[in-house]
Amino acid sequence: MAARRKLEKLADFKRALKQKYGLGEGSDYKPWIRVQDVKSVGNSAKIDGIKVGRTHHTLSEQETCFFYLAEFSSSVVDIREQFPLIPLTLSLKIAQLLDIEYPTNPDTNDPIIMTTDFLLTCSNGKNIWYEAVSVKPDDKLSGKRTAEKLDIERVWWELLGVPFHVFCMTELNQIKSKNIQWFTDAKRKGFLSPSRNIREKAKSMLGVGTAQLSDVCGVFAHEMGMSSNDALILLKFLLADKEVVIDLARPIVQSGMIEISEIKVDGVSEQYAS
C-alpha cells in the first residue's frame, strides 16, 4: 500500500500539486485525498471503476453508495472524487465574503484545501456539463459548521457555473446502490464478457415480470451447457450493461429475485412491463 501523505501545511499542498494530485481527467485523475491518507470514521473503500478504468477512493459508506449510483447513470461519463477547491486564495476570499471562518488544520492552524466529494462529468451525447456533489449524513446537515462549509463549496462552484448538490443516503438509494454493486462486480473483477450470440440467446429466454435468480440461472445453465456460476456471471453482465433492465428498488440478494421491466434485443427495447 502507498504511504500516507501529510496535507497539513502550504508546502504539503504545493508538493501534492507537483505530484498531480487533484489534477487530470478520466484514468489520469488522482484524487486529492486517498483512502490511505486519512483515518476514516466510516467504511472507506477502493473501487475498481468501470467507466474510466481506475481505482476510485471513497471515504465513507455514504460516498460508496453515491459512487455506484453515479457510475451506473447513463449520463455520467467521468467521476472525480475528493476534488480540491483550488486555488486556495479563491476559497479564502469566498469565506471572507460570507463572513465564515475558514477551516484550518488543528495541528498547524494553516488553512486546508477544501474538497468536494464528487465532480461528475455528464453528457447526453451532444452536450457536456459538470455537476458537483457533497455527500453528507442526515445527522450532520443540521449543524451550523457543516452548513457554513457547504456554503463555501456552493459559492465556489456557482462562480464556475457548475450546479452544486448535497446527497444524503436513504434506505431506497442504499438498496439500489447495493444491487448495482452486486451485479457489476463481475465486470470489476475482469471476468470475460459473454459473446453477443450468448447474450442474445440468454435474453430470448427471459420475459418481463418477476423471476427467481435460481430459476434464471438454471435455465441458462441447462439450455447453454454452462455451469451455474457462469450462468450467474452472464446474468450479471446483462444487468450491468442494461440489456436487461430491472427494478433496482427491490433488494436482489436478500430476496433472491429480480423484477424485469425491459429487455433489449439487438439494442432495441422489445418488452416493457405493463
Image (spheres, rainbow, N blue to C red):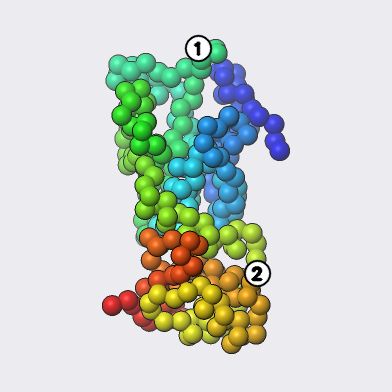
Along the viewing direction, whichever of 193 and 88 lies nearer the viewer: 193
Q: From what the image shows, is residue 18 above or below residue 129?
A: above
Picture residue at 33% right of the left edge, 25% below the top: 143
Within 10 Å of the Cα at label 2, are there few (<14), some (14-19), or many (20+) other Cα atoms? Answer: few
Asked if residue 184 is positioned above or below residue 80 in the image, the reply reads: below
Sooner in the amino-acid sequence: mark 2 or mark 1: 1
What kind of residue is marked 1?
A: Asn
Instruction: Name the residue rendered at 39%, 44% in the picture.
Output: 169
Q: What residue occupies the far front of the structure in this picture?
A: 255
User: Residue 211, image x and y in percent?
Assistant: 44, 76
Q: Residue at x 58, y 49 (%)?
A: 47
Quadrant of the rendering where the C terminus is positioned: bottom left
Report the side of 258 relative to 3 (left or right): left
Please tell me whether mark 2 sits on a helix, a strand or a loop: loop
Q: Which residue is mark 2?
A: 192
**Residue 54: image location, x then y, percent:** 60, 50
Residue 109: mark:
1
Residue kind at label 2, given as amino acid type: Leu
Answer whether residue 112 is visible to the viewer in this image: yes
